[in-house]
Image (tube, helix red, strand yellow):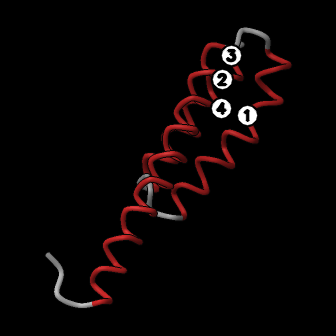
Amino acid sequence: MANHKSALKRIRRNEAVRLRNKYQHKTMRNALKKLRLEEDKKAALEMLPSVISMIDKLAKRNIIHSNKASNLKSKLTKQVATL
């Protein structure tokens, strides 16, 4: 167990941050799935900027790797273009 007040605070904070990251990552994955299953090009084009924005925010906060973000955005853009 932690011996210092600051260490206890750090443990609490780390758990809160972990839960927030987990929530944001899961939300992004759900949005990706929804976009991939979309068959209407117009609807997909409307959803694409918000999903790309989510991906960029997660990459900026190091929740996902920047290369993974780039790969996801590239694949999504290609898929929407072929609809």
The kind of residue tagged 2 is: Leu
Residue 46's place in the image compared with 61, above or below, is above
Disc 4 secondary structure class: helix
Q: Is residue 58 above or below residue 61?
A: above
Q: Which residue is mark 4?
A: 77
**Residue corresponding to mark 1:** 48
Disc number lying in front (3 or 2):
2
Q: Quadrant of residue 3?
A: bottom left
Q: Position of residue 33 (x, y in %)?
A: 56, 23
Look at the numbered discs 2 and 1 and tell me whether their residues touch, using CB distance below 8 Å.
yes
Of the pair 12 and 43, the residue shown nearer to us: 12
Q: Which residue is mark 3?
A: 82
Q: CA distance from mark 3 to mark 4?
A: 9 Å
Disc 2 secondary structure class: helix
In the figure, is residue 48 to the left or right of 75?
right
Q: Amino acid at mark 4?
A: Thr
Answer whether labels 4 and 1 touch (C-beta < 8 Å): yes
Q: Give the residue displayed 27% in from the left and 84% down from the top.
A: 7
Q: Amino acid at mark 1?
A: Leu
Picture quarter with the N terminus:
bottom left
